């Protein structure tokens, strides 16, 4: 992260820290979205900085502050957040602090990537953005997924990957857009209705937000009914598989297992478990 570029925006967000969830346990694999509180947020400009407050302190923000909400899944190997902005409340404004990846689920936003201000459209990804998320033009609705994860390879650099330039691959019941950039990738997956899939394991965690549909997720012998808004952690080394009950979708990135050193990214994808 380029601290010189971000220093004007990164502030002491004591109220955000106070309202943050405690890290989830290693044996938690699914966090239902309905069980996660939508924390009230507020952001406003103050000279060259973007300030932010959360929870009860958000109600004390200056007049004219942008208000929005945040849901978080603080997994042991990375945090997933969903930021929901509305035109009626000022659109998009959020200081980027420890977030390492952004995915625009809907709407648009502006951020700084590699020292340049870029516009992020629906389906775009930004790796190691800095500064602040802002409106791209007039205030509008937007939903942005963020991850705070370590680089898989140790050589992460800022990058923007446009959804319009990313081809959809896959076959049969699975379609996938794989956004590649130094240090990691983001995957946007679509699943057609299908029975129980093949058991898989992986060398890295997958930190997932379900964006649509209805599935049964099986991990480590436990079965979970999941749908839009639910957070999932596929844990490295544990067997998992899916049963798709209704056409579904999710977005995900990889997290390094706890205590793991950087890896060869070609070895980060799912592979059949050793027998």
Image (spheres, rainbow, N blue to C red):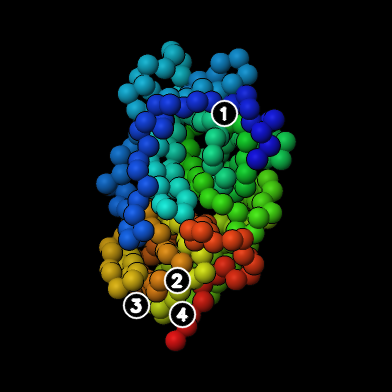
State the separation of the CA atoms marked 3 and 2.
23 Å
**Disc with the residue nearer the chain's start (3 vs 2):** 3
**Disc with the residue nearer the chain's start (3 vs 1):** 1
Residue that label 1 marks:
10
Q: Quadrant of the N terminus?
A: top right
Q: Name the mark on residue 237.
A: 2
Q: Nearer the viewer, residue 97 or 104?
A: 97
Residue 214 location, x and y as percent? 32, 62
Q: Name the mark on residue 273.
A: 4
Q: Quadrant of residue 128?
A: top right
State the separation of the CA atoms marked 3 and 4.
20 Å
Q: Name the mark on residue 83.
A: none
Q: Quadrant of residue 244?
A: bottom left
Identified at 30% across, 52% down, the residue is 32
Callout 4 crowding tier (Cα within 10 Å): few <14, some 14–19, many ≥20: some
Q: Is residue 180 visible?
A: no
Q: Is residue 181 left or right of residue 37?
A: right
Q: Most extreme residue toward the front, as rendered? A: 259
Identified at 30% across, 73% down, the residue is 221
Q: Quadrant of the C terminus?
A: bottom left
Residue 15 location, x and y as percent? 40, 26
State the separation of the CA atoms marked 4 and 1.
42 Å
């Amino acid at each position: 992260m380029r601290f010189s570029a971000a220093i004007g925006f990164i502030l002491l967000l004591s109220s955000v820290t106070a309202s943050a969830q405690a890290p989830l346990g290693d044996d938690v694999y699914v966090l239902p979205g309905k069980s996660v509180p939508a924390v009230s947020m507020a952001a406003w400009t103050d000279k060259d900085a973007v300030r932010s407050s959360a929870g009860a302190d958000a109600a004390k923000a200056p007049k004219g502050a942008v208000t929005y909400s945040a849901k978080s899944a603080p997994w042991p190997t990375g945090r997933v957040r969903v930021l929901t902005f509305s035109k009626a409340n000022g659109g998009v404004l959020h200081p980027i602090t420890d977030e390492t990846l952004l995915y625009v689920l809907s709407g648009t936003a502006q951020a700084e990537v590699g020292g340049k201000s870029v516009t992020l459209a629906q389906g775009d990804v930004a790796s190691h953005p800095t500064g602040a998320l802002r409106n791209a033009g007039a205030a509008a609705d937007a939903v942005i997924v963020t991850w705070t994860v370590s680089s898989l390879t140790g050589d992460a650099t800022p990058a923007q990957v446009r959804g319009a330039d990313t081809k959809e691959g896959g076959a049969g019941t699975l379609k996938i857009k794989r956004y590649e950039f130094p240090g990691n990738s983001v995957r946007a997956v679509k699943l057609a209705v299908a029975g129980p899939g093949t058991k898989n394991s992986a060398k890295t965690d997958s930190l997932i937000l379900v964006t649509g549909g209805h599935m049964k997720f099986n991990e480590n012998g436990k079965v979970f009914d999941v749908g839009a808004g639910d957070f999932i952690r596929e844990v490295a080394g544990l067997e998992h598989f899916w049963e798709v009950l209704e056409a579904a979708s999710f977005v995900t990135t990889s997290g390094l297992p706890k205590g793991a050193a950087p890896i060869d990214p070609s070895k980060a994808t799912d592979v059949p478990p050793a027998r």
